[in-house]
Amino acid sequence: MGPRLRAAGLALPLVAFVSVTFLGPMVNLLTKSFYDPEVADALPETMAALRDWDGQGTPSDEAFAATAREFVAARTERTLGRTANRVNRVASGMRSTIMGGSREMAEAAAVAEDAGVEMGGAFWRETMIGIDSRWGGPEPWRALRAAGQRLTARHYLKALDFERGPDGGYQRAPEAWRIYVPLFWRTFLVSLGVTLLCLVIGYPVAHMIANSPPKRANVLLLLVLLPFWTSLLVRTTSWIVLLQNQGIVNDFLVAIGLIGDDGRIAMIYNMTGTFVAMTHVLLPFLVLPLYSVMRAIPPAYMNAAVSLGATPFQALRRVYWPQTLPGVGAGCLLTFILAIGYYITPALVGGQSGQLISNMIAYHVQTSLNWGLAAALAALLLGGVTLLYVVYDRLVGIDRIGLG
Amino acid sequence: MSVPAPDDRGESRVPHVEFAGVDKSYDGENLVVRGLDLAVERGEFLTLLGPSGSGKTTCLMMLAGFEAPTAGTIRIAGRPIQDLPPHRRGIGMVFQNYALFPHMTVGGNLAFPLEVRGVEPSLRRERVKRALSLVQLEGLEDRRPAQLSGGQQQRVAIARALVFEPEIVLMDEPLGALDRRLREEMQYEIRRIHSTLGVTVVYVTHDQQEAMTLSDRVAVFHNGVIEQAASPEVLYEEPEKAFVARFIGENNRLDGVVVSDEDGVCEVDIGGQKVRAMSLGLCPPGARTTVVIRPERVAVAPPDGRYRNEIETRIDDMIFLGDHLRLHMTVGGASDFIAKIPNVVGHGAVLPGDTVRVGWAALDCRALVPEELAEGEEEW
């Protein structure tokens, strides 16, 4: 074994760890956004029978028979509920249609067996439409067929607020029903706002630290880093203590008579809370790259600019600012990317109006268990960030980023 | 700019730059610059020379406006400038490491002082061109500073400090980063530019050779005060302070006590031997003194009776330096007494261990107030 191979071997534990705990689950989850074999596996004969259907009217008698057989069989094995859930996501109402219908189908099958009636396609067509008239139309069949596609774009379409139209095709949801695209927009704007706020607050701070004598710079840097060593949860919840209705800030404002006791400002559980807490949490990520870039800029440049006749503001704008751009780029990109996927802070202090797309992803992972949609939303987010990165690289050049 | 002199004694000539009783302290306790009085004439090339930490750069920074004096006044053409912010002083400055803006081209760097002054583009281009040709860098407008050699960067920095036609140019150890050969070339270049433009230059360096080469006048700084400000010749030939004698060029120093002082010549007892030196009226009889004598003014085995100072001594060591020889010997208890003798025909075949007679003229040595070495101060 060569020395290089042995050296690479040292990295093996990490590679293995990352693969097992990060890459693997990520690929697995992202796969779910476009690959969904569950319904297809649960109802193979139904899918085979529906394959040749033109999507108009009702499918063939064989399809009715296969569907009923598989529904009844799955019901007995108690696996039908999951399948029904899947189909329900394609077309709401399908869950009750399937679950309720299957019970009556089982009963009909038992009766028919006792009576010795042959249960062919025609029998099931008649029985199913009798149980639920909807089986006589194309919609439930379209839903079944759509849910049965292994490779599917429906999660992505849903994540982009498209819905199934009456003709089976996809169309944009009506304005009031759109959820995800506005949420993406909100996430984007909040992240942009937080990033800019961090930049406005962090730039002078970084400048001050970079131009302080070493001893003071260390203390200031410590103050910036201190929040890093505190649990994110503690930091976020302390904002609740500060900003809530009966919190310190409101109490203070009431005490000094700036607002009345009935006019307490809602600063938390809304967008304001999300903004304040996220800015606080993300500030170090902007200050640190800025600081390391600024520290490398000798003060002689500013002195030179001023001695050449520039006002302090001109010197800042023309000489200092351009030289800090690599740090500004690095810090903003880092902050923006972190902000766009932020979850815990908006979840804790965002209330309803301060929720971001990651909260929706968490909802679909934990509560609605629609992992396919969660994965699609996450994939879109990841794609957006990657796109941003590429654009930044094209415009500025990623190698110009200065992390110090 | 005709401003009457503050004390109206009918003098029409107002110094271009004037420090009057300037103190500077960074911590409110230790003075970096103490009671500085210094006047620079219009068109003069004045160098502030001194070891690091002697306060010379602080003076420059106060003049440029980056530091404020703790006490005292700085005037430009008779007008106090403490309330004038640095960007309105109209002083060109060349920084130690050039401070060329790395994100601008050479042309951008040169145009910068013109842009912030609102000079219109066509005129700007012409003046940038002229400044570049002044430092012999025509056609390099589009280069970035990083693409230039050290010497070229230095020239650009000088051009940038001159392009807006300031009347005063400050240079803070501008040649410190260059190698020796380039440094000498640039010294010549700076001299040429100074004589071409006739601007007033205040130059800071710790290199005494550089100061001698460039300056009309040199102010020697030590511990925040000016020890002596004079032309290079006067500083070399007629030092008034032991520090100046030590710092400028090379000097032998003999510590002793003044015995008598007559007609400008004093007799000094140096470890039992009598030495006659120029008395400057600094040390009365009985006082301790330091007699300084240049090594090249010491003659080895001079004709009898030529010099009033003659001492028998043994040569401890001899170093051959091509055009001259350095003889190390012990005189009056000082073991570092040096004689420099030119390597010419008949310089006298002396060898280490030989006992020789050395002599020098009383005119060539001076009795100065001994230097009290501050504790821990670096020996030069």
Image (tube, grey):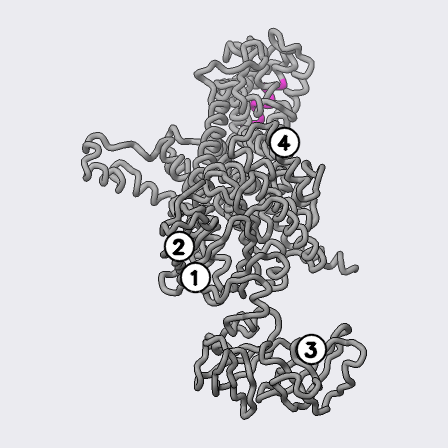
Task: Find out whether the residues at labels 4 and 2 contact each other: C-beta distance under 8 Å.
Answer: no
What quarter of the picture does the C terminus of chain B occupy?
bottom right
Tags 4 and 2 on a common chain: yes
Query: Label 2: chain?
Result: B
Ranked by sequence position, the earlier of labels 4 and 2 is 2
Q: Is residue A289 visible?
A: no
**Magenta part of the chain:** A66-75
Task: Find out whether the residues at labels 1 and 2 contact each other: C-beta distance under 8 Å.
Answer: yes
Ranked by sequence position, the earlier of labels 4 and 3 is 4
| Amino acid type at mark 1 | Val
Q: Is residue B216 visible?
A: yes
Ranked by sequence position, the earlier of labels 1 and 2 is 1
Quote the CA–CA distance across marks 4 and 1.
41 Å
Residue B125 pos. (x, y %) = 63, 31
Tags 2 and 3 on a common chain: yes
Tags 1 and 2 on a common chain: yes
Residue A253 pos. (x, y %) = 23, 37
Camera-side residue: B108 or A341? B108
Camera-side residue: B333 or A224? B333
Query: What SS does tag 3 mark?
Result: strand
Q: Residues within 10 Å of mark 4 (few under 14, many from 20)?
A: some
Q: Which residue is mark 4?
A: B125
Q: Which residue is mark 3?
A: B340
Task: Find out whether the residues at labels 4 and 1 contact each other: C-beta distance under 8 Å.
Answer: no
Does residue B303 appear to the left or right of A38 in the view shown?
Answer: right
Quote the CA–CA distance across marks 4 and 2.
38 Å
The answer to which image quadrant residue B146 occupies is top right
Tags 4 and 3 on a common chain: yes
Query: Label 3: chain?
Result: B
